[in-house]
Image (cartoon, rainbow, N blue to C red):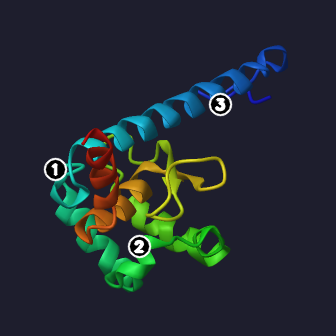
Amino acid sequence: MSTEPGAMQVNAENADNLEEIEMQFAVKAVQQAETYWSLLEKVQGSKLKLTKHDDQIYEQLLDDFPEFKDKATAAVISEEEMKSPQGKTKWREFCEKFKDLEDYNFGTLLRLKADDEYGQDTTIFAVRIQFYAIEIARNKYGLNDWIYEAAHKEKK
């Protein structure tokens, strides 16, 4: 254990609190997913702005990941590519460009396929700016509009 001033010290007796903290993050991520889904049921994704920086995030996504110019890339995310060593490096560089945005690196759930609902086998854990980038692209391409349409079809 370091005794340098300002060094983080971990008490082994309190280490089990880390599990509680992880659970709190998971609960927060699920709440965010539920809120987003509810929003998509009320507003067509193609008419939705997620942040005041949507255009900047989208343009940077296309600059750093030109493959997202093809809406099929936004429709289906490859977890293997995203989390490969090369993918992690590219995404980390992308994410750091938005470090001034609040909670840019907060953990959140990301659907692997735009035509799937949130579920245990249909989502991955990502950071908020990745979620924004991919969901902004999906919304611009109209890939999330089906959620609104399905919700309003049920009401008729």
Q: Mark 3 points at which residue?
A: 22
Q: What residue type is labelled 1?
A: Lys
Q: Name the residue under label 1.
A: 52
> Would residue 96 be visible to someone looking at this image?
yes
Tag 1 secondary structure? loop
Q: In the rendered view, does 77 fall on the left or right side of 153?
A: right
The front one of 149 and 75 is: 149
Where, by quadrant of the figure, is residue 46 drawn?
A: bottom left
Q: Which of marks 3 and 1 is nearer the N terminus?
A: 3
Residue drawn where x is 52% and y is 70% of the image: 77
**Is residue 68 placed above or below 13 in the rendered structure?**
below
Residue drawn where x is 24% and y is 73% of the image: 59
Q: How crowded is mark 1: few (under 14 residues within 10 Å), some or many (20 or more)?
A: few
Where, by quadrant of the figure, is residue 58 drawn?
A: bottom left
Q: In the rendered view, does 57 fall on the left or right side of 84?
A: left
Q: Which of marks 2 and 1 is nearer the N terminus?
A: 1
Give the number of the mark in front: 2 or 1: 2
| C-alpha span from label 3 to label 1 | 29 Å
**Is residue 72 placed above or below 131 in the rendered structure?**
below
| C-alpha span from label 2 to label 3 | 28 Å
Farthest residue, direction top: 13
Q: What percent of the width, then of the height, locates residue 67?
A: 41, 85
Q: What residue type is labelled 3?
A: Glu
Residue drawn where x is 20% and y is 65% of the image: 56
Q: What percent of the width, then of the height, locates residue 91?
A: 49, 67
The front one of 56 and 131 is: 131
Residue drawn where x is 50% and y is 37% of the image: 29
Q: In which quarter of the image is the C terminus?
A: top left
Q: In the rendered view, does 99 fall on the left or right side of 111?
A: left
Q: What percent of the width, then of the height, locates residue 109?
A: 52, 47
Label pair 2/3, CB-CB below 8 angstroms: no
